[in-house]
Amino acid sequence: MFRKNDDRQSDEALMVLLQSGDAGAFDALYHRYSQRLLVYFLRMLGNDRDKADDFLQDLFLKVIDKGGQFRAEARFSTWIFTVAHNMCKNEYRRREVRKVIDPEADVEAVSVLDAGANPGIHEALDRQRFQSRLQQVLLTCDDSQRSAFILRFQEHLSIREISEIMDCSEGTTKSRLFYVTKKLGKALGEFNPQVNGVLHHAGK
């Protein structure tokens, strides 16, 4: 059961409590990370909600089963996104991800990039079209580039953290971000002139 005083605990402290069998610590971590990780899986798995839900459930089972592998000096966010990233990599190896876009998907729930649209019905519709197109273009990108982009823009992680999660050099991460943002800027610039400006700073 989630306890209010758990809000004052760091992620890492909660993991230490979980390792000692504290169920409340698990509930607190789930409360903090489940939505973020669901959105990550949705983006990585082509908006397949059933698959994303299954991955989310499996991921938190891994948190319980493999929690003993977590080192208290490590950042929990980096650790759990590393596990999530590896799950997606294994899925890509098992099969080619179906590139299906669900037009009825909740666009706001899977938003990773705000192009700076102003309030209003026309802007809202344009934002929906933008997010749908963004999803389409992301699914044509290499999975490593797509993952780097999501971790950078959706999770706002640093280049260093992304490199740790993806087990690569910072130079490789910057290169992946350069290519994916260049592709997205070319494909999405028509929606808002600010898009190219936002994407230009992705690797900085």
Image (spheres, grey):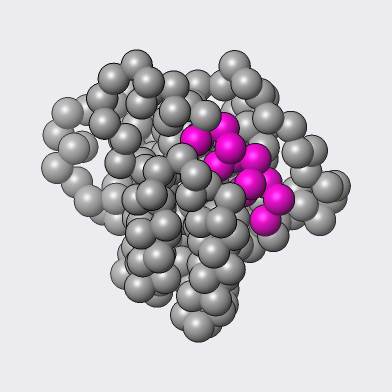
Compared to 168, does 132 lie above or below?
above
The quarter of the picture where residue 12 lies is: bottom left
Compared to 122, does 140 lie above or below?
below
Does residue 55 show up? Answer: no
**Range covered by the magenta-colored residues:** 130-141
Instruction: Specify whether residue 133 is painted magenta.
Output: yes
Residue at image location 44% in from the left, 22% down from the top: 125
Locate residue 133 relative to residue 156 in the image: left or right: right
Between 107 and 63, the residue placed more toward the observer is 107
Locate residue 144 relative to residue 164 in the image: left or right: right
Name the dominant secondary structure of the magenta segment: helix
Instruction: Specify whether residue 44 is painted magenta.
Output: no
The quarter of the picture where residue 33 lies is: top left
Q: Position of residue 78 (x, y in %)?
A: 42, 60
Between 138 and 51, the residue placed more toward the observer is 138
The quarter of the picture where residue 75 lies is: bottom left
Between 108 and 199, the residue placed more toward the observer is 199
Residue at image location 52% in from the left, 29% down from the top: 129
Residue at image location 42% in from the left, 70% down from the top: 203
Image quadrant for the N terminus?
A: top left
Locate residue 159 relative to residue 98 in the image: left or right: left
Q: Position of residue 163 (x, y in %)?
A: 49, 72
Between 25 and 50, the residue placed more toward the observer is 50
Compared to 26, does 124 lie above or below?
above
Q: Position of residue 93 (x, y in %)?
A: 81, 56
Does residue 171 show up? Answer: yes
Give the number of callouts: 0
